[in-house]
Image (cartoon, coloured by chain):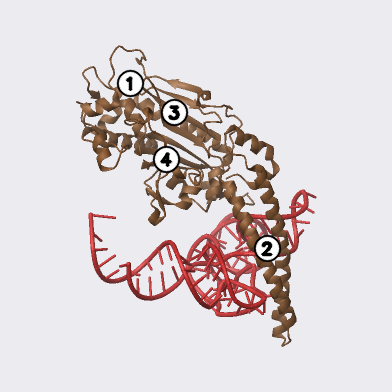
Amino acid sequence: MLDIKFIRENPEAVKEGIKNKKEKDTVDEILALDKERRNLIQNAEELKAKKNKVSKEVGRLKAAGESADDVMAEMRAVGEEIKTLDDKLREVAGKLTELLMWVPNLPHKSVPVGQTEEDNVEVSRWLPEDFSFESDEKFLDHIELGKKLNMLDFERGAKISGSGFPVYVGKGASLERALINFMLDLHINKHGYKEIFPPFLVNEESMKGTGQLPKMADDMYAVERDGLYPIPTAEVPITNMHRSETLKEDELPIEYVGYSACFRREAGSYGKESKGFLRVHQFNKVEMVKLVKPETSYDELEKIRLDAEDVLRELKIPYRVLELNTSDLSFAAAKCYDIETWSPAENKWLEASSVSNFEDFQARRANIRFKGKEMKKPEFVHTLNGSGLATSRLMVSILEIYQTPEGKVIVPRVLQKYTGFNVIG
RNA sequence: GGAGAGGUGGCAGAGCGGUUGAAUGCGGCGGUCUUGAAAACCGUUGAGGUGUUACAGCCUCCGGGGGUUCGAAUCCCUCCCUCUCCGCCA
């Protein structure tokens, strides 16, 4: 959520940001409601001040044994008037908040302005030694490999749950588990994050806090009976841990890493992109979340990005980093990098991680603040997160890149101590 | 799921219709004293909104929402949460 004061004072900058993000511009409507709201507040408060003053006077009169009937009658009328104004105020304020919830975060000034995902900018690329894009081997894709090696069972997943719910079998399951443990350990021990194992179902407030609701409602599963939502990412429960808290300045930065299953309806996205692991309704992801002081958030963004990249370097998977342009930036993000891993069989890059700075957008929604000794008032923290990483896309690259000419898969060296075996097949 | 108890400032804990935004204690901050520290003593110490160049002023907030009343932390309704006991259960 943007600060209404900021919108009031910088309407043109807000309009431009909204336009660049290709979202709906409601700024004029918002400003009109804001003005109406402030008028109502002034009128109501004037009456309330009068009422408070007179009511105290009534107390005094009664204590002195005098009559106050006429003043009481007058205040009854004032009370009615106040109620009318307050009802109107509630209505106007509600409309205003609703509109504000749909206003996207503004892109940071460093973000390239663009029209489509084609306009994303590749900022770096890393290839393992000896790696070559050109190879005369015929690569089996991850679906064929998964089937041949009896590691992945998409058909049975579809039977027990539906399409997009893969089952990991045997060494496939072990490899998945190894990958999760390896990534967690790396972030905890080498990069210094604190581990969180969060709930996988959250309430509506949490989904609003990080910005999934109301805008992305169609992409979320919902357990309506209990008012809960299966999380689309661990970002939601972890960031919301500190919802409505005022942290101490010296507690920052807070750096969490957590594993969760992630649930996404992926409404309306069928077709080629959705085969196998490329688009699924449930997948596993290790997520990093940071709560930091505003002035450090862009340095922290670079640090999270490097922490995510480190996973791929350890695994020796080729990857590239894209800086997203304004049109591809998500609703809540001010700046975002995507990290894509190489899929030889698909012959293309696959998004395996997304690293974002939300500045104070989520913090304002979730009311997460901090206060230092020298500070007069609490301020909103900046929140960031990054996948570190999502296993489904990563698994595609690992299976395809580590396959041998005989159709076996070598377990990446850093995972071997986790799996207890070195080769699958 | 059933029965009961309770939710007040950073924490503990009073208040139960009228100068109570809230006693008291602890903690925090500032000061006096001290070579320094502790102790003691004095002062101070919540948030949001509106408004102002900035102050001031004013409004709101005692789990959330609604109601009664001239006036509510205090009374009523409702929802949520926590704790205890019973039942069920990985």
The structure residue drawn at horizontal position 74% and vertical position 69%, both measured from the top left corner, is: A50
Q: Which residue is mark 3?
A: A339
Q: Secondary structure at mark 1?
A: loop
Res A412 seen here = no
- The amino acid pointed to by label 1 is Ala
- Where is A386 relative to B5, above or below? above
As drawn, the chain in red is: B
Q: Which residue is mark 1?
A: A345
CB atoms of marks 4 and 1 within 8 Å: no
Q: Which residue is mark 2?
A: A85
- Where is B55 relative to A339, above or below? below
Judge depth for marks 3 and 1 and give the one in front: 1
| Residue B43 location (% of width, % of height) | 67, 65
The tag earlier along the polypeptide, 4 or 3, is 4
The structure residue drawn at horizontal position 46% and vertical position 48%, both measured from the top left corner, is: A207
- Position of A22 with respect to B59 (left or right) is left
Judge depth for marks 4 and 1 and give the one in front: 1
The tag on residue A19 is none
- Position of A52 with respect to A344 (left or right) is right
Q: Which residue is mark 4?
A: A193
Q: What subunit carries mark 2?
A: A
Q: Are marks 1 and 2 on the same chain?
A: yes
| Residue A82 location (% of width, % of height) | 68, 67
Q: CA distance from mark 3 to mark 1?
A: 18 Å
Q: Nearer the viewer, residue A223 or A313?
A: A223
Q: Give the quarter of the figure containing the N terminus of chain A.
A: top right
Colour representing chain A: brown
- The amino acid pointed to by label 3 is Ile
CB atoms of marks 4 and 3 within 8 Å: no
Q: Secondary structure at mark 3?
A: strand
- Position of A408 with respect to A83 (left or right) is left
